Structures are given as structure tokens and as C-alpha cells.
Amino acid sequence: MSSCTILAFFSRKPDLTSDEFKAYYETTHMPLIKDIAGIHFPITHKRFYTPRILVGDPADLQVDVYAELTFRDIEHLNAFKGTLIADAERLAEDEERFLDRKKIRVVMVDEPVVSRGEE
């Protein structure tokens, strides 16, 4: 059995600033997710916020954070998903406060292909 990773892409509600969005995610949403998931919480749950655009039109990027969740195996992922489904109403109420739920995207990814520079 090998680990599995999912990426989740989230966009904030238009009435929130980037700082408000990040603060809510970290201080309210993450504790809720940890409470709901309990022992099924991912091995790691990394969040990467997008405070500035280096190339392209900022209006084209409709993602304020992407989260990388790593699980021991597919069974662990399925157990996590099961906890979210079981508490879907409470989760949805929280997401409505800060996420544009129509823009949520979640994908499972393969192991990374890595290129390194010379040392």
C-alpha cells in the first residue's frame, strides 16, 4: 500500500479580503476539519495561499489557496471522506461563510515527478 495525495483548490467569497480568508481558514475552518475527521485526519494537510500573481492577469486565477492532503493509503482517504460526508451539514454551513463553493475542485494526483538542478 502506498500513500495517496489529493489537491483541493478553493476560492474565497468576493466580500472577503485575502487576509480575512486566510485567517478564517486557519483559525476556524481547520479546527473544524480536525474535529470532524478525528483519527482520520490526513498525515499532512498543507495549505499554499496565492497572495500575488507573478505572471498573467490576476483575474484569471480564481484560486486563493490550494491544499495538499496526504494519506497513508486509499483506505485512509476513504475514511476521511466518510467523516466529511457524515457531518456534511456542519461542513457546508462553515464553507458558506468563506468559500465560493461553486469553484471548489479536488483532484487525486500521482507520485510527483521531480527534476533537480545540479548541486
Image (spheres, rainbow, N blue to C red):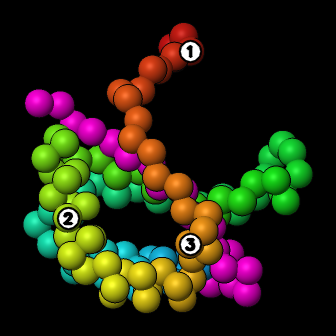
- Report if the CB atoms under discs 2 and 1 are less than 8 Å apart: no
Q: Which residue is mark 1?
A: 117
Residue 51 part of the magenta segment: no
Determine the residue positioned at 60% across, 68% down.
102
Residue 111 horizontal/vertical position (percent)? 36, 27
Q: Is residue 92 left or right of residue 10?
A: left
Q: Please state which of residues 50 and 104 is positioned toward the viewer in this rendering.
A: 104
Residue 56 horizontal/vertical position (percent)? 87, 45
User: Mark 2 or mark 1, which is nearer to you?
Assistant: 2
Asked which quadrant contains residue 31, the reply is bottom left
Determine the residue positioned at 34% across, 52% down.
69
Mark 1: amino acid: Gly
| Region in magenta | 1-20
Asked which quadrant contains residue 20, the reply is bottom right
- What is the secondary structure assignment of the residue under circle 1? loop
The residue positioned farthest toward the top in the image shown: 118
Instruction: For label 2, count other residues whose C-alpha is less than 10 Å away and answer few (under 14), some (14-19) or many (20+).
Output: some
